[in-house]
Image (cartoon, coloured by chain):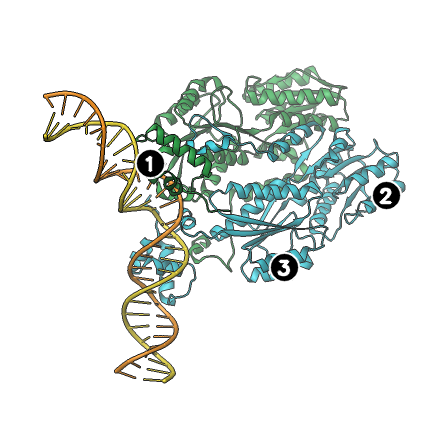
Chain colours: A cyan, B green, C yellow, D orange
Amino acid sequence: MTRKTKLLDIAEALGVSTGTVHRALHNHPGVSTMTKTRVLQMAKTLGYRPNLAARYLSSKRNLRVSVNTLQGTTSFWDEVRAGISEEAHALVMENVEIEYRTYPRLGEGEEEAFEAALKAGVDGIITFPSRPKSLLSGMRRASRSGIPVVCVATDAPNTGRLAVVSIDTLASGALAADLMGRFLGGKGKVAVTLSSLAITEHAEKHKGFASTLLGLYPEMLLQETIEDHDVESEAYEKSSQLFKQHADLAGVYVTTEASIPVLNAARDANLHGKITFITTDLFPALVPEIRSRAVAATIYQRPRTQGRMAFRVLHEFLVEGECPSFQSTLAPHLVMRGNLDFFLQRQSLESSPQRAVRLQSASPELVEYFG
Amino acid sequence: MTRKTKLLDIAEALGVSTGTVHRALHNHPGVSTMTKTRVLQMAKTLGYRPNLAARYLSSKRNLRVSVNTLQGTTSFWDEVRAGISEEAHALVMENVEIEYRTYPRLGEGEEEAFEAALKAGVDGIITFPSRPKSLLSGMRRASRSGIPVVCVATDAPNTGRLAVVSIDTLASGALAADLMGRFLGGKGKVAVTLSSLAITEHAEKHKGFASTLLGLYPEMLLQETIEDHDVESEAYEKSSQLFKQHADLAGVYVTTEASIPVLNAARDANLHGKITFITTDLFPALVPEIRSRAVAATIYQRPRTQGRMAFRVLHEFLVEGECPSFQSTLAPHLVMRGNLDFFLQRQSLESSPQRAVRLQSASPELVEYFG
DNA sequence: ACGGCGAACGTAAACGTTAACGAAGGTAAA
DNA sequence: TTTACCTTCGTTAACGTTTACGTTCGCCGT
């Protein structure tokens, strides 16, 4: 294989200077249409690919990305932010500044945060579009200005966003359904509780659950769905009512983040050991419920990995002008009593990443890490 | 925050030249002990961290890594190699050459491949130590020569290897046990088939399965374990015998790669629908078994991700002199009939990674990707 | 005293890209 | 014609590290 072609190769092949080639390749002003097309053509035939090391070394601009997420009452978004921060830190090469903009509740202050990020002139945005409609205008504008926006956890369709990183929602629902069917021996009444069918993410999980359950376990009965709008009291009230109406309920798939109120409602209705629960996410309050086997299984949405992926996609686009894919869906992890401890251990390990250094051949310049 | 300290900063602070600083930091000859310690001290107080872009741009040495794995009859190792290749390709910055050395069978040609890699003078090795004892001498030598070795899929203890990337084996076994217990309603006879208890990986899976099963489902009975040594006929014979001896067997956890012979033995013993199977890995022949529900669930070991992680760890060490951790364990994925299709779709997507480019702000230099 | 020889250190040219500045040439206004 | 001002392009100094090569020294042996 011949040496990699560089700017100078293109320049010499055309009898121009590297400056002209650079301007042509980057759509900078000051190049005639003729030479620009000639440069582009030659770049293509020579198979030019930029040397990122040289590019970074030369331009000391630092990228600024805004991370707009829910405030961290639930540990989910803390983990997402941790994943983003980790991946950003791993890119020692680059100089990335991360600005966190959080909003307290679903849809509250979401649009303002986005506008603030735009006004601040960031180079890219990672956001959780809980209310896609309210963000539509802002995201469209960002798209037109060439500012890439990556959605995490849930999609915002038709907004011109660069990419979306999320759990495979259909697969999550389908897995929950198949597990539920197996756990219950293929028969019984089951129900789903979720935040709101208006959110793409939850609607798809429900769809995956329903279609798989009906397809694989035709003897099972799916009751009507509960929407709690992420309000704990609403979750408790509505599920209490559900348990009252269906005393013979065998299983519940809880897609809500507010799974504790649902469990409490079951406990108060004296259905504690009688209902098989499959929940979503993994947070401290859920741990004893899994350990006591009140919850049969929970579907872990890997927030940290979602954060890492989101940043990686955005960064790759900012640096290279392309990104791996428009849609990155992760397979969820299944956590049960059996492997719960391994998960908790993994989490605690990840949150205090003690970097390993090999004494023998470590460069002396790295001694600082020992402290 | 002040600007990053560079070589020149250290040099000026001490009244020496950048060349001396560089030699001191890298243990190169030609520096007095006095100045070397002074440089190291100053580097630490100034918090020097090398600029990797400049480093790479300057030195055009390319890294060579050897990947020693099993020949790709099973799709597992093909996926591992694909993951390595993917991650290597993603590092556009660096110039990494990957040399694949494969051996036909477990322990056959393994040592020779390792010696060949050492003799070829590679900068790092990724290997699958199926017979850790046979590799011990070679790996010890590699360690002394400062050549990092990363183990994939299974560990090779006390060999001085840099790191190991594998599935969390204990968690895998524990998850299988908990699922088995739930599927079977907490009672019944179950058995385990595996390759060999001499392989760390399989021994740990068995340990996780056994302890979780006995701990969580005290009414279940665990029969003695079958070792098939990765020979298909042996797997068939021994499991046939098992089914004959225990006609009331309720479930089998198949950790072997040779799960098909076990399923066939059950079919020939007319136990087809009566036994709940939990298998390992996901390969074409297993797909119809899952679809027909002969296999209740399979534990997917994410070979591609293992490959990616292995390369990433090795690369980070080669470039930065440190690595994220000595032990990277991945959580396995659970594949059932419900989410099978999503997994197959994901695999096919990953194997033909169609890169997405955003037309609007894509640099013209990237036009080549459209072809 | 001379040459030779290391050890210890300085010097400067690479690596490929970016961006600021300058120099041609042409056109339009004075 | 001169002045000014574009457009189009060439020139060059950064960016921080690596590395080959030069330069001092002091020391030894003849």
Residue at mark 2: A242
Label 3 and label 1: CA atoms lie apart by 51 Å
Which chain is disc 3 placed on? A
Residue at mark 1: B20
Residue at mark 3: A115
Question: Observer-nearest residue: A211 or A142?
Answer: A142
Amino acid at dot 3: Glu
Whether labels 2 and 3 belong to a single chain: the reply is yes
CA neighbours of label 3 inside 10 A, class few (<14), some (14 to 19), many (20+):
some
- Secondary structure state at the residue bearing disc 3: helix
Label 2 and label 3: CA atoms lie apart by 41 Å
Label 2 and label 1: CA atoms lie apart by 76 Å
Whether labels 3 and 1 belong to a single chain: the reply is no
Residue under the point 53% across and 59% down: A146
- Secondary structure state at the residue bearing disc 1: helix
State the image coordinates of residue A6 (x, y, percent, origin top left). Answer: 35, 51
- CB atoms at circles 2 and 1 under 8 Å apart? no
Tell me if residue A257 comes above or below residue B189 in the rendering: below
